[in-house]
Structures are given as C-alpha cells and as structure tokens.
Amino acid sequence: MAAVGAEARRGEGWRAAPLTVPRSAGKLPRPGKRGRDPQARQSATRRDAASCPADTSGPTGAPRASPGPRPLTLLEARPARSPQFPPAPRVRRARPSRPAARSAACRSAEIPRAPWTPWPSPRCPLGPGPLRAWSPPCGGIRAAAAAPAWCVPCLVSLDTLQELCRKEKLTCKSIGITKRNLNNYEVEYLCDYKVVKDMEYYLVKWKGWPDSTNTWEPLQNLKCPLLLQQFSNDKHNYLSQVKKGKAISLKDNNKALKPAIAEYIVKKAKQRIALQRWQDELNRRKNHKGMIFVENTVDLEGPPSDFYYINEYKPAPGISLVNEATFGCSCTDCFFEKCCPAEAGVLLAYNKNQQIKIPPGTPIYECNSRCQCGPDCPNRIVQKGTQYSLCIFRTSNGCGWGVKTLVKIKRMSFVMEYVGEVITSEEAERRGQLYDNKGITYLFDLDYESDEFTVDAARYGNVSHFVNHSCDPNLQVFNVFIDNLDTRLPRIALFSTRTINAGEELTFDYQMKGSGDISSDSVDHSPAKKRVRTVCKCGAVTCRGYLN
C-alpha cells in the first residue's frame, strides 16, 4: 500500500496533521456435549459513581506538567495544498493566564520537539511495526472518504488523550478539553494515606491527569465522602483477606499504609472504573428495556478482554440468516383468531398475563414483521427483549461470573434470549475440543429439527453468556420462530420455571433436553475412554457431579 500510495502521489507535498478524536413439538436445543466454564474468567461489576465536584482553583500544590517528551502527533496522508482536503480541526495550545515558574533544571531536561521529516516510514507510538499511513480518526475522515485505504484508527484511549492534552497544556474540543476545563481538578480516586504532624493526608488521583501529577491533600480539603468510604472499605477488606477472615483495623498511631495495602486499594479503584465503563457500554449496546448492572465484591477480576455484546445471532462466514418472514397474520385479536401459531399447527404459547402455557418441547411461533397486528399484540413477547433489570456479578463459590435478577420474576415468564455466533456443527466440534481442554464451553446446539448449526457465545453474546449451570435450574429453554421460519435456526428463549426472587441467581441446565430430561451426552458410558470432564459446582441436592 505504501508503494502504491507513494506512486499515486509522487511529487506532492505532505504535512503533519494534529491528533483529533471524535466524541465520544420437538426437542429443545441444548448446550451440546460440553459443560460450561464454572470458573470462567469473564468480567463485570456495579459501582457507585462517586467523585468530588470539579475544583477549578486546583488542589494544594496543584499538579504541574512534568518535563518529558511531547506526545507524538498522528500524520494525515494528504496533499499539502489541495482544495479537496479542507484543513482538519486544530489542537490549539492554551494560553495560561499565569505561566508556571520552572527551574533551569526542568528547562534543560525538557526534550524539544523534533523537526518534521519527510514521509518515509512513520511508526505508531503505541506499538511496534511501521505503518503505511497515519490518519486521525475524526480530522482525517474527510480525507479518508476520498482515500479510505489511508485511514488508520487510533488505539489510544480517551483518558490517555485527555491526560496528554492536560500535560502539554493543549485544548481539543473533540475530546472534551477546553480552555474552561483545562485546569479543572476532580478527584477520581484515593491512592494512599499518611499522617504528618497529626494531620491526615490522602494521595489523590486527579481525573484526566496522569499519575505523575498525583498530590497529597489534607482530609479537610476533600469533599468526597463516598470515595473516602470506599477507601476505608477496601483497606479493611484487604486486611480481612490477609488475616483469613479475621477483620482487623489499623491502629490510630500508624502513620502510613503498607505498600501492599495501597497497591490493593489502587487496583480496586481502577477495577471499579473499568467495570463502570463496561456497564455503560453494555447499556448503550442493548436494545431491550431491562437495565444491565455489573458487580464484583469478591476479587480483582475486571471486564472481559475478548467479549462483544450483541442483541441477535451473528452468522459465521458462509452462513446466511434470512430474517424476513414470507407471510403474516391479519388478526385484529390474536387471542381469538387464527394466528401464526395456528398456521404452523401449534397452540398460542402465551396467556393474557404474558406467561408461557405450553409444555417444554413445543415451539413458539410469534407474530412477525408482516403481521398486521400492532406492537401490543399478546403474541409478541420474546421479540421485545428482556424486561427485567439484571446484574452480572462475581460468584463466591468459584463459578466465575453469574447473573442475578434485581427484581422479582413471576413463574413461566420470559427472562432472556440466548444469542451468539452461529456456526456449523463441524466447526462446533473443532471449537469444542479446544474448549474442553480449557474446561469451558458456550456451545448451544440448535437441534430442534436437525443438527446442522450451533450457537457459540464465547466471544459474541448478551447477558446469557454469563448465566451459570445448575442441575436444579430456574430457567427452561424454548425454541422460538419469528421472522426466520427456518426450522434449522430457531431462536433460543429462556423462561422461568418458578417464581424467582430479587437477588437470586439465574441458572439453566446445560444438558437440558426438550422434555426436561438429562441429555445422554452428560453420561459417560465408556469409562476407558479418556475425556476432559468439568466438575459441577452448582451445589444442588440433585447435582450430577459433572457438567459433561
């Protein structure tokens, strides 16, 4: 690409562009032959948002830009003078009202900005390897429209960009740094504690500022009671863990925290921030009414690094999902007229209380996009999505992450849909061997009529990705057909089997069949055959001992 670009633009001038970032009747499917991960290293946590109000006057001993190299700017590949490429938004240097005094040592230690050099081989400041061309994500969008091959996304996080801007006294409206808030100081979290001359001090991490600008602030200057309470709770939780459950407290005459305690407190604070951001991301991506919360009061596990939230099936390459119905009903009242279920030869699945009334193993046919009934039709339940607020939480029994309901759920009510990547059965066997070796699985066989496809929720999924197994579950699976009437590709819905109280964990049997019986795949008929078996930790009285 570099050679092509150089040849296409031979003789044209190039220049560096500043960095800019935009604003921010059959058997039911079962999870297959492999048990799910009881210790899945996946993520989440709910966090109370707590922070001090912004203090534009600055902290005691206000953080100052430390000397060091200036951040590299991204290069935008475009001609120096061309009417086709209007100038990109500029990152302007703020003009401080009172320049900070700096010592001669600081000035001598400062690394000057390197002069601009010709194009030859720019490198990304965040990773190894040369790049063919740099283009800022927003400033170069207009240039990228004309030459999309020359646009490279920025891998720097928004927080890092804000810290770099404040460190260099730069303003950039695209990432929320303006002259008005350039010198604002807001407490993000507390890092450490000490007592000097009978006065208590806390080490403050300032939001949007690098760690090098952390400052010690007296307790009387901190107006963030929730952050102070979190700091105290984290300290005592760590001490309780060290003493094997025996809660202790620091003596009043202790002048400072041990480094291990301070390190744990900082990790816990960063975990809260990361999980809160992930929670916000989940709620931005969901398309249903119920809210998603995350919570971790057990360990330091953070958000999953390789999980992507989706709301519907994601077909793998080579698989086509036809999500357009060929016919629909013309009912005015689907309860009393010949509706979609009757056309398919089955009964209407729901009663007037929106509860399922058909036995397990019977398919659900809901009204689709071609039906003339409105969105309030009683035969539109699963397609409306989860109506309950759910919480992804870290379990304390070694089962990794789980899901609990935050509200009471009535029996026989729709709770959630199981979604993921749709793959072939052959691909599922290949992935299943890898998952078995790791002791995990998210494979759900779509075997309502045939066994051609499987849903893999390992990387792509929704809240159901985190639902744990139980040999005595409170959820039952049903096949659902709405717009896609292909019997090889039913949608998978989870309904409550009994009343589920607020705070109770949601579970389903990974080996559940349409009749409610245990799949024969979970029984080892050949002890001589070497198998990787996953121990079940559900704790139920009827526990089978293994997930597979």
Image: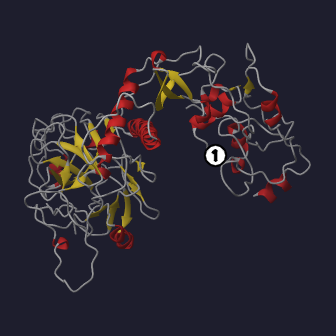
Instruction: Give the labeled residue for mark 1.
Output: 153
Residue at the (24%, 45%) spot, across then down: 245
| Image quadrant containing the C terminus | bottom left
Q: Is residue 296 visible?
A: no
Place of residue 236 in the rendered image (x, y in percent of width and height, measured from the top left): 32, 36
State the residue lying farthest toward the bottom.
528
Decide if residue 102 is in sight here. Answer: yes
| Closer to us: 112 or 245 | 245
Tag count: 1
- The residue at the point 24 percent across, 84 percent down is 529
Task: Give the quadrant of residue 159.
Answer: top right
Residue 345 rendering spot, x and y as whole percentages: 14, 55
Q: Is residue 170 above or below residue 334?
A: above
Residue lying at 17% horizontally and 62% vertically, measured from the top left: 512
SS at mark 1?
loop
x and y, in percent, of residue 2 in the image: 78, 57
- Give neighbour class at mark 1: few <14, some 14-19, many 20+ (Cα, 10 Å): few
Q: Amino acid at mark 1?
A: Pro
Q: Nearer the viewer, residue 149 or 166?
A: 166
Is residue 200 or residue 293 the one in the foreground?
200
Judging depth in this view, the residue of 244 and 386 nearest the camera is: 244
Residue at 32% over, 63% down: 441
Figure quadrant of the N terminus = bottom right
